[in-house]
Amino acid sequence: MSAPLTLLHRDDHLVAVHKPAGLLVHRTALARGEREFLLQQLRDQLGQRVYPVHRLDRPTSGVMVFALSPEVATLLAAAFSERRVAKRYLAVVRGVGPEQARLDYALREEDGRRPKAEMPALAAVTEVRRLDSVELPVRVDRYPQARYSLMEALPLTGRRHQIRRHLSRRGYPIIGDAKHGKRNHNRFFKEQLGCQRLLLAAVGLAFDHPADGRPLRLTCGLEPTMAGLLERFGWAGHLPVNQAQFGESTSDAAPAP
């Protein structure tokens, strides 16, 4: 039996939960052999039906919101699709990432049904900021030292794998990304640092509550593997905590770290 999911917030209208890395949100034809899904686990844990309103990639951990009624699901889904939700992610990347940058690269959808070249290129924007960096005295690539950065990413659009693809295209692939990352760095983290997962986590959401309009700000802590890595690299000051707060307007600000 799986361990109980960590609830970040629950009221009569919605619930926010920490999705573990590697767990699918719901059943899909692309993962027919899977038996565990976040949607079913949360439903069973709460003893009531829940309704998904946004997505999070399987290897990504972090905060997810579910509605507790079809009416609230419609309101929340509209908030996400209309970009009225501020999202904040943390990622560990190869190299010394930019101090601050706006990544504005159109992306073709990756739906798995048609060749990507046949898909239309859609506008995609991600704002990134380097929070910290580290240099290790090991040769992983062609250099005698290996450098890594902790990046904050604020996606302003919601394309599939947007943060992963944008950072990789800029030259700073996320560690643990098997599709868009660098194999030798992924292998170093797995074999030498005991870190096998994608080092990308959704740590914040901010939106107006669908029932009364009050701004709700959610933050989500990291799983032990990723949190331990940040501590090892001297980045503990950037560790987020589980928290739910009603407060100031969310219209122009991302969730606080």
Image (spheres, rainbow, N blue to C red):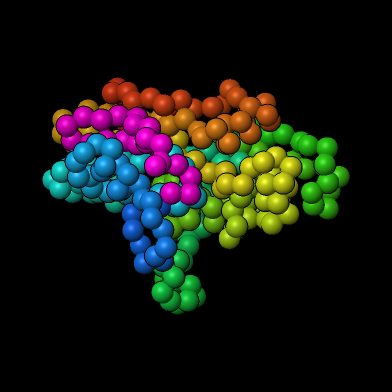
Residue under the image location 57 percent in, 36 percent down: 226
Q: Quadrant of the N terminus?
A: top left
In the rendered structure, which segment of residues is drawn in magenta? Answer: 1-23
Q: Is residue 195 magenta?
A: no
On whether residue 3 falls in the magenta region, the answer is yes
Left or right relative to 159: residue 82:
left
Q: Would residue 182 be found to the left or right of residue 226 on screen?
A: right
Vertical order, 238 against 146 (above or below): above
Residue shown at the point (32%, 23%) measured from the top left: 245
Q: Is residue 230 left or right of residue 71?
A: right
Q: Quadrant of residue 169?
A: bottom right
Q: Quadrant of residue 31?
A: bottom left
Task: Judge by depth and name the residue closer to the eye, 253 or 173.
Answer: 173
Image vertical order of residue 205 relative to residue 115, above or below = above
How many numbered marks, from 0 up? 0
Q: Compared to 152, does 53 lie above or below? A: below
Residue appearing at x 68%, y 47% in the figure = 190
Between residue 52 and residue 238, name the one nearer to us.
52
Residue 257 percent across, percent down from the top left: 47, 27
Residue 33, by quadrant, is bottom left
Residue 220 x, y percent position in the rendering = 43, 31
Residue 51 seen from this side: yes
Residue shown at 41%/58% (left/top)?
A: 34
Q: Residue furthest right?
A: 144
Q: Position of residue 68 (x, y in %)?
A: 19, 41
Q: Nearer the viewer, residue 249 or 54?
A: 54
Q: Is residue 96 visible?
A: no
Percent x, y of residue 157: 40, 51
